Image (cartoon, coloured by chain):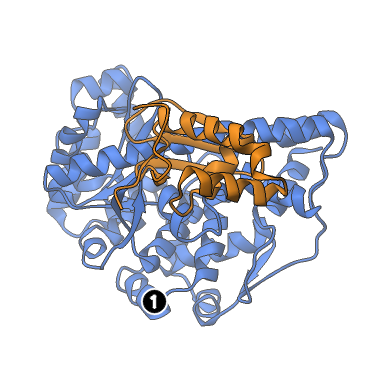
Amino acid sequence: MTDRGDRGALGAIAGSAIGTTTASRSQNGGPNGGDLADERALVEAIGRERLTGLALAAVERGDLHLSTAGHDELWIRHEDQLMLDLRLERLLVEAATLLERADIPYRALKGPVLAHTVYADPSLRSFGDIDLLVADDTFDRAIAALRALDFERRFIEPRRGFDARFSKGACLERADDLELDLHRTLAPGAFGLRLGNTELFRRSPRCFDLAGKTITGIDPELAFVHACFHAALGDFPPRLVPLRDVVELHAAGFDTSVVTDVITSVRCESVLQRAVHLVEAELGIHLDGELVDWLRAYRSTRFDRWALRGYDREDRSYATQVAASLCALPSVRDRAAYVAALAFPRRDYVRARERSYARRLNRGVQVFNGSRTR
Amino acid sequence: MSAVAEPTTVWRRNDTALTRLTSRSVLLTTAQSDEMHRLEGTAMFVWLELETPATDEQLVGGVAAGIGVEGDDVRGFVLAARRTLVEIGAIVESDD
């Protein structure tokens, strides 16, 4: 099976069995394991994309055909993934408890929230880390609190306070390989900066129970916005699970006027438009409804089209993302602080990333050249 | 905890259990322990039966009815599975 064929089969699995009247699936045939080598590659890719639950459901419905060996391999991968999900959920409970004790409001995002509140069964929505959102002014305190769970930053920030002011957040890791993404907004770059953080805590959370503890999760409207951000800006080629999240959230329903208000106020319509387009292109699912009709018809600005180009290529353009972020910052003072931090970061940051200031400055010139208006 | 429970003891799932149900097993851990357990066979049936709290005899009756056999045929297996589930912290005595 070719890479493209693999991708098509994975897309069919990720888009399979959508039980909703607000979406329709194009008839492009079901996935098939093909010969044994292809099948092994497909099962491996299913595991990598964290689609084992959906793939097994497709096997049970007769939509995906695997050999006995392939089926067994899929089961092994599925159980391994579910065990990771459970370890991460235990971590979520511990982290939420710590943040509450430190009086730091938080919102759980993505995996566990959607697994327990949106998907028909939590086994259908696996994840690879825990994502927590905190407010800008509690960001550094939250990182300090999470050190009690032996977490450390994976990457040093360019300057103290940079992440709490400009980044999407910080990736925290520990010796047992579990990861926790601490967010201060929902996406990196210009669109994440536009969305900011303040609004995200004004809305009532959606709470759910996990191991006897009430977890404060993001509300359905912002969950949809976040799923679209993740799908449109997360990886290239886009991960399939966030695309499935968009479909599941859309099917579950939410107050579309809230989503429209939020994204209009921060001028991120083109991000959601791209997510809807990707759902159709990658999963073969055509979403219906007033909101998606409006998104399809939306005419994105020249700036948005340029900023989105930073995310839609194999060699995701760091230069474009930095330049677009600069444009999205609200004040001259913010822009100056942002440029100064990236141009002259702490020495340990340079050592960890690029080893010398000379290389750093050279890269700065490349960023400048790469960010010219096109 | 004593291996022999009072006949009137009511068992329930531990509130702190984290689980995933598949068609083959229940994967389970608890908030207090790093151990991961795979419940299969009778242990899985007992866990599923405890969706509502139950005594040993209610568990025996429920599991037997679920698989279409007499209670005496499964009593030993059910009680052994129940004891194991208590030992690993998956189920606890109900306060009610």
Where residue A180 appears, as percent x and y from the top left, is 34, 36
Query: What residue lies at 72% left-to-right and 53% top-to-bottom?
Result: A12
In the image, farthest residue toward the right: A35
* Left or right: residue A228 compared with residue A18: left
Where residue B58 appears, as percent x and y from the top left, is 52, 49
* Left or right: residue A74 compared with residue B5: right
Q: Which residue is mark 1?
A: A260
Number of marks in the rendered image: 1
A57 up-or-down from A303: above or below: above
**Observer-nearest residue: A318 or B85?**
B85
- Quadrant position of the N terminus of chain B in the picture: top left
Q: Which chain is orange?
A: B
Q: Which chain is blue?
A: A
Where residue A96 appears, as percent x and y from the top left, is 25, 44
Query: What residue lies at 13% left-to-right and 43% top-to-bottom?
Result: A101
Where residue A359 appears, as percent x and y from the top left, is 33, 22
**Observer-nearest residue: A312 or B53?**
B53
Give the residue type at disc 1.
Thr
Query: What residue lies at 75% left-to-right and 66% top-to-bottom?
Result: A26
On the question of residue A126 being in view, the answer is: no
